[in-house]
Image: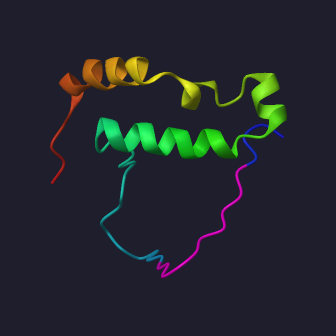
Amino acid sequence: MAGCHIAQPEGNVYINRNSEIKCMHFRHLSIDHVIERNAYLYSRLSEINKKMGWGWHIGLPRERVEAYFNENRANLKKVI
């Protein structure tokens, strides 16, 4: 199955489903954060996903991630 997302939260996990404030994809906090997160996600990628090319973007070299990050910096918006 493409993606094979399975959630197994560990530790002190709290989900507030009634909050009016939502965390909206804070995945691009810094270049280093994205590189570390991609390395972790790539390490979990199954052989079928690699074979089919699913999740290819998390295997991009640091230079490509930095270029993407810097190109999109101009689109940042202050939300709070």
* Looking at the image, residue 70 lies above or below residue 7: above
Q: Main SS of the magenta segment?
A: loop
Q: Was residue 51 drawn as part of the magenta stretch in this picture? A: no
Q: Residue at x 42, y 17 (%)?
A: 64
Using the image as rendered, state which of residue 31 and residue 4 is in the foreground. Answer: 31
Q: Residue at x 39, y 18 (%)?
A: 63
Task: Specify whether 37 is left or right of 69.
Answer: right
Q: On the image, which quarter does residue 52 sit in? A: top right
Q: Residue at x 53, y 40 (%)?
A: 39
* Looking at the image, residue 62 lies above or below residue 13: above
How does the figure colour the protein chain or chains? rainbow
Using the image as rendered, state which of residue 38 and residue 1 is in the foreground. Answer: 38
Q: Position of residue 59 (x, y in %)?
A: 58, 27
Task: Specify whether 25 is left or right of 29.
Answer: right
Q: Which residues are magenta?
A: 5-14
Q: Residue at x 66, y 62 (%)?
A: 7
